[in-house]
Image (tube, rainbow, N blue to C red):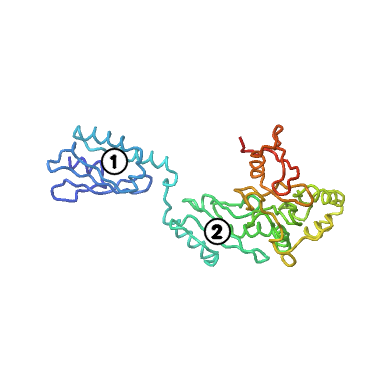
């Protein structure tokens, strides 16, 4: 039995004089897994127990019954399960868990360190304990800091890494088996420079106007909702590749306040000057001056919902406005719908609910909320 056990499992060796405990490893896809076989004092195989490391337990999770059946069959017939039996089971586990398929070679780590030495350790913001995920610092020509997240493959640099960053366009960086992190970082800088004008436009808008949405703009955001007046705003969507061209514009607010602005926009858009700043162009075509942090306090823009008294309701913002010029109170669509539906005096025609403004009592309508029953 002993010779058979060692012959079939050369990395399993007896660890006591009685030769009832065998300890060692089995290898699967260049990975070693610790396991132990414990025999009873009479050395009857059918009463043997199999112990393994937690990594092997993790891989064989869901296959316990198969392992039990295989070992019971062999041991009940006085045979030792061959290492190939466990190898096959482990390979099944490895295939079902992609994160466990491969471990980088020693050359991987030496290659990574050499590349970081060339790139500069000051560019490294973070690296995980497995040396797979890196976050690299990059600065554009205007001094804005950006982060490039790089997820290396086990066969780096033969395999292209997965890269991501907070950008308004898809990130596609060239890679060959001869590429390095330094070259990757250099290509990322070129991408940043191609977007510099886009960020310049948004930085000017952010610094000189009151931004209602998004609350915390990221470098990937292409939309800004800019306050114009009390319950009146304009939403602009910029093209990252052509940021100085006329953006998509949507005026929001009470109809009596929005209609004159819409007419001016339609009448003056032909005079849009791509050589001037977007903010200056918006002022000219709308014939207005935008409130700015230097001249107005944000609290002066009454944008909270008049029913729930909050600005953001999950992902929604107050976009339903009373059209009475003396009121102009905004509401969330869902809030106004539920309010009007509860009033006996309200009526509904198809998806439109007709009722009275909760503030001024004037007629107001709202479309049925998409999630409403």
The image's mark for residue 83 is 1
Residue 298 in the image, given as x and y percentages of width and height: 69, 61
The image's mark for residue 318 is none
The residue closer to the viewer here, 335 or 5, is 335
User: From the viewer's perspective, is residue 131 above or below residue 49?
Assistant: below
Residue at disc 1, secondary structure: helix
Q: Is 144 displayed left or right of 120 in the figure?
A: right
Which part of the image, by quadrant, shows the N terminus? Answer: top left
Residue 226 in the image, given as x and y percentages of width and height: 73, 56
Residue at disc 2, secondary structure: helix
Q: Is 243 displayed left or right of 64 in the figure?
A: right
Residue 332 in the image, given as x and y percentages of width and height: 66, 47
Which residue sits at x=72%, y=38%? 354
Q: Is 121 displayed left or right of 262 in the figure?
A: left
User: From the viewer's perspective, is residue 63 above or below residue 257?
Assistant: above
The residue closer to the viewer here, 102 or 209, is 209
Q: Could you classify mark 1 by the number of other residues whose Cα lies within 10 Å: few (under 14), some (14-19), or many (20 or more)?
A: some
Mark sitting earlier along the chain (2/1): 1
Which residue sits at x=68%, y=60%? 193
Number of numbered discs: 2
Q: Please give the residue where the numbered disc 2 appears in the rendered image.
A: 181
As measured in the structure, the alpha-carbon distance from the residue carrying label 2 to the one carrying label 1 is 41 Å
Residue 342 in the image, given as x and y percentages of width and height: 64, 39
The residue closer to the viewer here, 294 or 223, is 294
Kindly indicate whether the residue at mark 1 contacts the one at mark 2 (C-beta within 8 angstroms): no
Which part of the image, by quadrant, shows the C terminus? Answer: top right
Which residue sits at x=52%, y=49%? 159
């Amino acid at each position: 039995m002993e010779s058979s056990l060692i012959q079939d499992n050369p990395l399993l060796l007896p660890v006591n004089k009685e030769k009832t405990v065998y300890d060692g490893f089995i290898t699967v896809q260049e990975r070693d897994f610790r396991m132990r076989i414990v025999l009873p004092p009479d050395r009857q195989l059918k009463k043997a127990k199999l112990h393994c490391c937690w990594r092997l337990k993790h891989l064989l999770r869901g296959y316990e019954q198969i392992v039990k059946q295989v070992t019971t069959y062999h041991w009940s017939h006085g045979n030792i399960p061959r290492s190939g039996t466990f190898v096959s089971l482990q390979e099944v586990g490895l295939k079902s868990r992609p994160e466990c398929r491969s471990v980088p070679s020693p050359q991987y780590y030496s290659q990574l360190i050499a590349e970081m030495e060339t790139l500069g350790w000051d560019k490294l913001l973070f690296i995980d304990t497995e040396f797979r995920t890196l976050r690299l610092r990059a600065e554009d020509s205007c001094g804005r800091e950006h982060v490039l997240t790089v997820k290396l493959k086990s066969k780096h640099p033969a395999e292209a890494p997965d890269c991501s960053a907070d950008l308004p366009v898809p990130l596609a960086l060239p890679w060959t088996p001869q590429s390095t992190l330094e070259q990757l970082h250099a290509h990322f800088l070129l991408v940043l420079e191609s977007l510099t004008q886009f960020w310049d436009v948004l930085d000017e808008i952010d610094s000189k106007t009151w931004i209602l949405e998004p609350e915390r703009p990221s470098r990937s955001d292409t939309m800004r909702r800019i306050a114009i007046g009390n319950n009146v705003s304009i939403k602009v969507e910029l093209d990252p590749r052509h940021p100085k061209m006329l953006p998509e514009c949507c005026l929001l607010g009470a109809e009596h306040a929005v209609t004159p602005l819409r007419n001016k926009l339609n009448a003056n858009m032909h005079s849009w000057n791509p050589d001037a700043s977007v903010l200056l162009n918006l002022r000219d075509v709308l014939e207005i001056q935008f409130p700015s942090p230097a001249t107005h306090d944000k609290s002066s823009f009454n944008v909270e919902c008049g029913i729930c008294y909050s600005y953001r309701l999950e992902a929604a913002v107050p976009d339903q406005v009373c059209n009475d010029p003396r009121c102009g109170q905004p509401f969330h669509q869902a809030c106004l719908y539920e309010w009007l539906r509860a009033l006996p005096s309200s009526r509904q025609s198809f998806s439109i609910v007709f009722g009275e403004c909760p503030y001024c009592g004037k007629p107001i309508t709202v479309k049925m909320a998409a999630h409403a029953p």
